Image: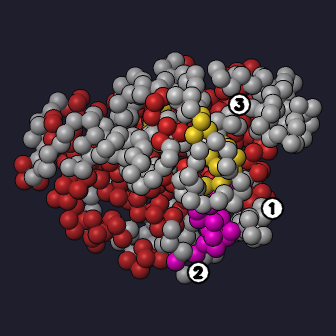
Amino acid sequence: MKYLINNIKIFFIAIFAICVSSCSDFLDKNPLDQISSETFWRNEKEVDMALAGVYNRLNSWTFRHKDGSLDVMAGDAYGTVINLAQGLIEPTSGSIINTIYNDCYRGISSCNFFLDNVENAPLDPERIDVYKAEVYFLRALFYFTLTEFYGGVPLYDHSVTIDEAIVKQSSKETVIAQVISDLDFAIDHLDNISYSDGHAVKGSALTLKAKVLLHQGKWQEAADVADEVIQDKIFTLHDDFRTLFLASGQNDNPEIIFSTRFLTPNFTSDLDIRFSWHGVLNPLQQLVDAYECTDGLPITSSPLYDPSDWKLNRDPRLIMTIKEYGETAINSAGEEVVFNYNNVSGTLYNPVKYCNWDALPIDYSTQSEQDWIHLRYADVLLMYAEAKNEVSGPDQSVYDAVNEVRTRTGVDMPELPLGLNKDEMRERIRNERRVEFALEGIRYSDVKRWKTIEDYVPTIQDPGGVMRMFDPSKHYLFPFPQSERDINPLLDQNPNYTQ
């Protein structure tokens, strides 16, 4: 709210001066000049510039790598926001409590300004609808993210004045209804093509809609929407799990459905600096132990498991996701490279996923450009499997979807055993999601919607001996930042937080 209201004061001039002139390579990689608000919306080039400004809202903490904070919150890692992960969450806690809220409303402000003005451009109505569809998709992403963390939030479907911005939050159901409406418009007007240049496509909107429905427990609807993406056969699994998360493997990648894009030197990520130098994210042993052995059995029952060699005979995704602290690596030239971490890992593990060994040794001059993936085809398959299993149990289509992920090229894990019942399949799907999407910021929402977080997180003892805490009476939602409630007195605090 603070950023929404502050932005209103200067929005009609500053949004494009700030967002657009700084995002020259964000989407189409073409230079953009400073624009004047007095002469704007006069041609398609200026609309493209405005659209790039909206997409640039993804270049924020919430929609990039997040330092792995959500994986810390989910109980799969140790590192940043550990105080929050240990239950020290209040309206004045700051950190991601404030950041997620502010980043989303900045994005919503940009979306609404674009939607309020794009019809002033002298373009065919059909072309304008395509522009609007991309922005509706982005607005849906911003609002859905807010509901995941705060529940019901203030809902604005157009640019508002300062006074108009001071409103009570809408219910979560009302906000989700707006999200679905925005996505339906996007689905109706976006091209049904592969994702290649950073612009949302129909598959992006369908996949996000499937995720929204899944998170509301609308199993049949979620399965139907995910299956539409599957049946369209536009997206497929990438044949190299490791390079899926590196810039070298992300151009025209058939698995990526939507991402935040980076390109040096103007749009760089500090992911390598944070993960491969500062070592801010340390995977926990519990995550390492979740990976099966190559016979498809968990380490607790597989005869292939060797406690003295945690990497031996394990799901190949394990060593493409996690490494041992102090372990060297091999770069793309086949050379052994060492790490210059300036932090010792608290768990003796560090990430591999998204980390570029060709950038070593890392320092503040390192410029990274791995895109941060929000939606990918493996998620479509596993969302379909989860939703369909909840509707009708593990039929052949459920097996096919999960096995497609497990047997992907370069992973080649065994297919699931036949004869699983609904509960057994549910557990296999949940573990498959854990290992497939490890350290991608997805699991926190998963374990909350499954209601497993309240049982699991309090069992974790962090380095230093501190036990984690999750209070189900309040921690399923973040509190609204106190700074926002100071500005908007109509905003009711979420239950059981200090007022």
- Colouring: secondary structure
Pair 3/1: label in front: 3
Residue 205 is situated, as x and y percent measured from the top left of the image, at 44, 35
Kind of residue sitting beneath label 3: Pro
Above/below status of 95 relative to 453: below
- The residue carrying mark 3 is 316
Q: Residues within 10 Å of mark 2 (few under 14, many from 20)?
A: few
Residue 353 shows up from this direction = no
Is residue 134 found inside the magenta-colored segment of the image? Answer: no
Q: Secondary structure at mark 1?
A: helix
What residue range appears in magenta?
72-92
Residue located 92% across and 36% down the image: 301
Residue 437 position by quadrant:
top right
Residue 109 is situated, as x and y percent measured from the top left of the image, at 31, 57
Residue located 76% across and 51% down the image: 285
Disc 2 from disc 1: Cα separation: 26 Å
- The residue carrying mark 1 is 459
Is residue 85 found inside the magenta-colored segment of the image? Answer: yes
